[in-house]
Image (cartoon, grey):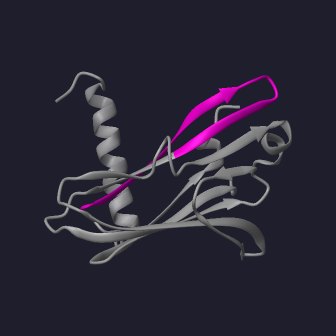
Amino acid sequence: MGTKYSPKELKAHRDQWWEHCLSHPDEPLGLFLDVRFKAISRTAKIHRYRLIITYTNSTKEAQDGWKLKICFPSFLPLSYDDYDYYEIRVNGESYSQLESSSHDRVFPGESVDVVPLSMHFIEYEVNQDVYHRLRPQHKITWQFYTSNAPVIEGEKSLFELQEF
């Protein structure tokens, strides 16, 4: 056991994990998508962030290629490199959807950056206007497809992906 967390914190995390497993019975185990951000620049008026998404194949089979669909609320200013772009509506709300794919094989235990920090990036901006429009329901959502495994679907609140 590591020393970063107290036993009480570890037990709370374990309980949260089991609760998550019970409430998401269709979620595939063995597939993992890590969605996080990195601040690129910060001024008093504008914060720019890059989204980073890493896929880890923790199954015992190689995954033959992948496809990512990621949706952002349309009021969020985006910059991106080499993604297919679509404007869509979900429950009456407008979203910007970016799509990317690869035919590369991902071996068991291997991790790949499906949205890397440098090339093939997704960058977004939070300014006063965006920050004041943020509500808990404003989320970034994704679907991640592989050739021989269930779809990984997820979401994160924009509050979790910025520090304005």
Question: Which residue is located at x 80 percent, y 37 percent?
Answer: 127
Locate the N terminus by quadrant: top left
Horizontal and vertical percent for residue 30? 24, 62
Question: Does residue 146 sit above or below 45 in this rendering?
Answer: below
Question: Which residue is located at x 57 percent, y 62 percent?
Answer: 141
Question: Does residue 50 sit above or below 42 in this rendering?
Answer: below
- Is residue 52 among what the camera can see? yes
Q: Is residue 48 magenta?
A: yes
Horizontal and vertical percent for residue 18? 31, 55
Task: Determine the residue located farthest toward the right in the rendered image.
Answer: 129
The one nearer the camera, 16 or 81, is: 81
The chief SS type of the magenta part is strand
Bounds of the magenta span? 30-51
Locate residue 59: give its quadrant: bottom left
Question: Which residue is located at x 65 percent, y 32 percent?
Answer: 163
- Is residue 152 among what the camera can see? no
Q: Is residue 100 magenta?
A: no
Horizontal and vertical percent for residue 37? 53, 40
User: On the rendered structure, is 54 left or right of 133?
Assistant: left
Locate residue 123: give its quadrant: top right
Locate the C terminus by quadrant: top right
User: On the rendered structure, is 161 left or right of 107?
Assistant: right
